[in-house]
Image: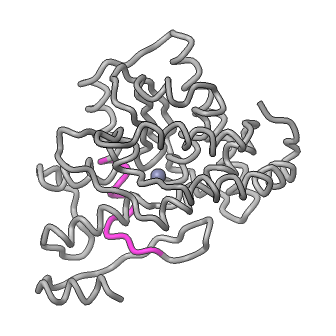
Amino acid sequence: MKLKKTLIATGVAAIVLSCATNPFSGKKTMAFVSNDQLFPTSFAQYNQFLSENKVVTGTADANMVTRVGQKIAKAAERYLDANGYQGYLNDYKWEYNLVNDETVNAWCMPGGKIVVYTGILPVTKSEAGLAAVVGHEVAHALANHGQQRMSAAYVQQGVALAGNVALSGDQKSLDIFNQAYGVGSQVGVMLPFSRSHETEADEIGLYLMAIAGYNPDEAAELWKRMNALGGEAPPEMLSTHPSNESRIANLTALAPKAKAEAAKFGVTSFK
Ligand SMILES: [Zn+2]
């Protein structure tokens, strides 16, 4: 295990690795932080973020964010229940907020805390395009990708670990948390997701949007529009979610599989 070697090399002692199971691949993944510790921090950080930013309510766009979020959450529950993970979302406290900010981004913190920035709406264009983004972000959360990013960041920054990391509220820990979950550029360089995490979130996200009744063909179209914004100053979404041509090809190839998955749940028409 490369990471373990790195830890030993950096002289960090008394490491206890805890594991979380990825409900989609069934694989054990390493996590320094358990949901018991992570969720309270996540919920507090989310509330703080909302208090410091302009939440949009009562508009057609805000209602769309809520509607899409609820449908994706419901799809996740149905999918997990059907695949032997009943109760996986018990501690989730889903929330969906649209924030007035020109940043082209969206994220989902642990426990189902979603933010969509108004700046991404011209790129998502339609409700199905937004469902592609929200499905993808929720997929990262369900597969614990942020936890793995955060674990890697702790190692990189040489933060001493004894047992589980205590998210005690010290600024360094909170900065790492925010970098891992995409909360804001004010905390410095955001951590990108790895290619394998992106591929996994794309596939899970496609299933979720399809089960929620949104046309999975729209995911490839969304990422084509996103990639077109690249260049010298790529949007936040692209810096944290590296993308390339193979992502579009992969999404296009997987869309029929997502429709077949949705059919298992009685969903055969898409908007
Ligand atoms: Zn991603």
Residue 70 as seen in the image, left or right of residue 257: left
> Does the segment drawn in magenta span residue 181?
no
Quadrant occupied by the N terminus: bottom left
Q: Is residue 33 magenta?
A: yes
> Residue 239, relative to residue 156: is it above or below?
above
Q: Residue at x 19, y 70 (%)?
A: 156
On the rendered structure, is 158 left or right of 212?
Answer: left
Asked whether 103 or 143 is in front, the reply is 103
Q: Position of residue 9 (x, y in %)?
A: 15, 89
Q: Is any part of residue 86 visible from this angle?
A: yes
- Residue 98: x, y in percent? 44, 24
For image coordinates 51% across by 61% down, the residue present is 143
Q: Quadrant of residue 132?
A: top right
169 vs 119: above or below: below
Point out residue 67 in the picture as x, y percentages from the top left corner.
62, 26
Residue shown at 28%/81% (left/top)?
A: 16
> Which of the pair 91/174 is nearer the observer?
174
The image quadrant that residue 215 belongs to is top right
x 23%, y 66%: residue: 165
Quarter occupied by residue 27: bottom right
**235 sits to left or right of 178:** right
Part of the protein shown in magenta: 29-41
Q: At which x and y percent is residue 152?
A: 28, 69
Say which of 203 and 31 sits in front: 203
Task: Identify whether 233 is placed above or below 15.
Answer: above
Q: Can residue 44 be seen at all in this image of the molecule? A: no
| Quadrant location of the C terminus in the rendered image | top right
- The number of numbered discs placed on residues in the rendered structure image is 0
Tell me, what colour scheme is on the image?
Answer: one colour
